[in-house]
Image (cartoon, grey):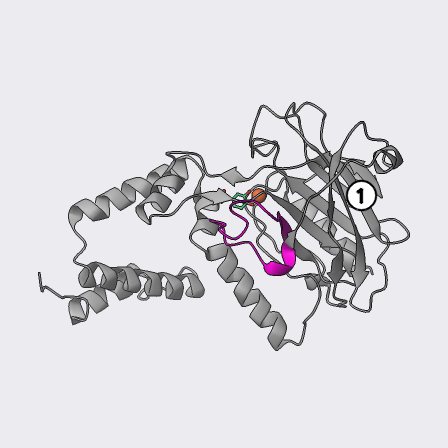
Amino acid sequence: MTVKIFDTPEVQDFLNSVAGFDQAGGNERAKRIMHRLLSDLFKLIDDFDVTQEEYWSAVDLLNALGHETQFGLLSPGLGFDHYLDMRQDAIDAEAKRTGGTPRTIEGPLYVAGAPEAEGFARMDDGQDPDGETMWLTGQVRDLDGNPVPGAKVEIWHANSKGGYSFFDKTQSEYNLRRTIVTDGAGRYTARSIVPSGYGVPEGAPTDQVLKALGRHGERPAHIHYFVSAPGHQHLTTQINLAGDPYTYDDFAFATREELVVPAQRIDDPAEIARRELDGPFAEVVFDVELARTDAPELQVRHARPRAKEDEQDRASQLAGTAKV
Ligand code: DHB
Ligand code: FE
């Protein structure tokens, strides 16, 4: 088919009306963005001769994604989360904010309000029969190498089946989710279990999209972090465990070389006794370097809808920071 109508005055006038350009009300930015989005899609329909069948099956797929609240899952798979990180890195570089532990995507599975502890926390509830004990520890420092005591280290990860508490209703509340405040030497330590990799639910709408692209929906074993301290830039990051088949083949594009960390198996009885454990364990060490900043808005995580986080939490977070 060679029909091309996009550049006709009728279609261009039509787009202006659809985007509300001829209406006084509404939001100017929303109008401009919608106009651009619809223009790009209309042009795509013209250029690819998109059929009625293709269009309506796409509508059906979007309905299914919404029905199963999977847009947050598909977003990293389609690279949006990593693209936003790349843009934020470029924004930081332009503002001469460089150095420190690199950021990488938050993912869709954070839950606010995890129990808080000073220096040390046990993160697992002891109910995972396949859970291999993990000793996760590190130091938070500034870019000059000075320890940062009192930093808030929020950690969350999956269980031995790759499931996250809250979203996986078989797990106890806040299992594998803790906030640890660093000790006087800037250190945090967690006893937990080694996470397994995560895969998007088989056959779900997100999986259908990835399969159509010839891709898989697997992530390597990984551990998420939010790290914050007064006077320092908030960091959203995660570590990917070395040696996982997906360490360098992550469907969510979150792997960065500096964030690949080994889990070292330790069976020396003296080391086991020193940690008061009952057997061999895997040690994961992850030190974090935070850049200093006086700007309050850089000291907190960006706003986005998150499970159990409401506007009030956000307001008090900002207020807490502004005082410093
Ligand atoms: C997804 C899941 C994760 O655990 C994660 O860290 C990132 C993305 C997802 O399902 O899209
Ligand atoms: Fe995750």
Quick check: 197 left or right of 114?
left
Q: In which quarter of the image is residue 156?
A: top right
According to the picture, the residue beneath numbered tag 1 turns out to be: 189
Quick check: 59 left or right of 206?
left
Residue 121 % position (x, y): 80, 37
Residue at coordinates 65% horizontally, 23% vertically from top-left?
A: 129
Determine crowd level at label 1: few under 14, some 14-19, many 20+ residues with C-alpha closer than 10 A: many
Q: Is residue 118 visible?
A: no
Find numbered disc 1 in the image and state the secondary structure of the residue it sits on.
strand
Q: Quadrant of the N terminus?
A: bottom left
Q: Is residue 103 magenta?
A: no
Residue 253 % position (x, y): 50, 54
Q: Main secondary structure of the magenta part?
A: loop
Q: Quadrant of the C terminus?
A: bottom right
Q: Can residue 313 be seen in this view?
A: yes
Residue 237 % position (x, y): 64, 54
Residue 285 % position (x, y): 75, 49
Q: Is residue 213 above or below residue 98?
A: above
Quick check: 314 left or right of 80?
right
Which span is picked out in magenta?
238-259
